[in-house]
Amino acid sequence: MHTEERTFIAVKPDAVQRGLIGEIVKRFETKGYKVIGLKMIRVSDEQAKAHYAEHEGKPFYPRLIRYIQSGPIVAMVIQGYGVVAGARHMMGCTDPNKADMGTIRADFAQVMEYNVVHGSDSPESAEREIAIYFNENELFPEGKCMSELVIESLDAD
Ligand code: IDP
Ligand code: MG
């Protein structure tokens, strides 16, 4: 049985300030992933610390916390077949100069410190991060989307 996943995506403050919200949301939508939650927020101290707990103590940590709070982010939950790995693939690797051409980070960013987008790195991280930013009643998973059609076709075999 093939099932859907969901993942947490953030359009980071640099991208919001540069007017790239639409460009970045559009990448995921045109891939066929379904946006089931979306809001512009200022990241609180608690959210920033919880989100990046795994990086506490690293040299770049203080800067990372400042960065994610340097302006509003657009927090999103997207849903689809294999969306956690799929979204990471679309984002490209952490350093935009090493990311494959055509990925979001390669196309829109120059340095790791301002790499325009966040995406959860595993299904477990996704659920943890979604809970930091969203209540379940802010998510709208109902309705057909392309990935459901994909799953239907896979399960028909
Ligand atoms: P990811 O965003 O690709 O999952 P992580 O290793 O989880 O990468 O790091 C979280 C964020 O911290 C990155 O997106 C980037 O903005 C920043 N970061 C990671 N490593 C470095 C570094 O070595 N120098 C500066 N910033 C970094
Ligand atoms: Mg990460």
Image (cartoon, rainbow, N blue to C red):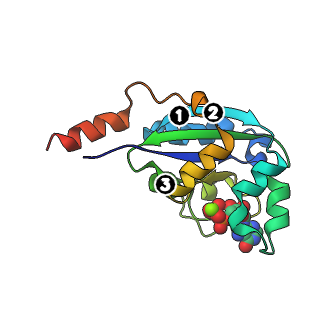
Crowding near the residue tagged with mark 1, few <14, some 14–19, many ≥20 C-alpha atoms within 10 Å: many
- Dot 3 falls on a residue whose secondary structure is helix
Instruction: Tell me the residue that label 1 is attached to.
Output: 35
Question: Picture coordinates of residue 56 (x, y %)?
Answer: 76, 68
The residue at 52%/56% (across/down) is 124
Q: Say which quarter of the image contains residue 33.
A: top left
Quadrant for the C terminus in the image: top left
Q: Say which quarter of the image contains residue 71.
A: top right
**Which residue type does callout 1 highlight?**
Val
- Dot 2 falls on a residue whose secondary structure is strand
The residue at 80%/67% (across/down) is 61
**Which residue type does callout 2 highlight?**
Leu
Q: Gap between marks 3 and 1, in whole Å?
A: 17 Å
In front: 93, or 66?
Answer: 66
In front: 146, or 51?
Answer: 51
Are circles 1 and 2 on residues that touch, CB within 8 Å? yes
- In the depicted structure, whether residue 62 falls above or below residue 131: below
Question: Picture coordinates of residue 99 (x, y %)?
Answer: 58, 65
Instruction: Tell me the residue that label 2 is attached to.
Output: 38
For this view, does 55 lie left or right of residue 135? right
Q: Residue reaching furthest left?
A: 157
Which mark lies nearer to you, 2 or 3? Answer: 3
Crowding near the residue tagged with mark 3, few <14, some 14–19, many ≥20 C-alpha atoms within 10 Å: some
**Which residue type does callout 3 highlight?**
Pro
- Dot 1 falls on a residue whose secondary structure is strand
Q: Gap between marks 2 and 3, in whole Å?
A: 19 Å
Which mark lies nearer to you, 3 or 1? Answer: 3
Residue 57 appears in the figure = yes
Question: Picture coordinates of residue 135 (x, y %)?
Answer: 63, 34
- In the depicted structure, whether residue 8 falls above or below residue 64: above
Marker disc for residue 123: 3
Dot 3 or dot 1, earlier in sequence: 1
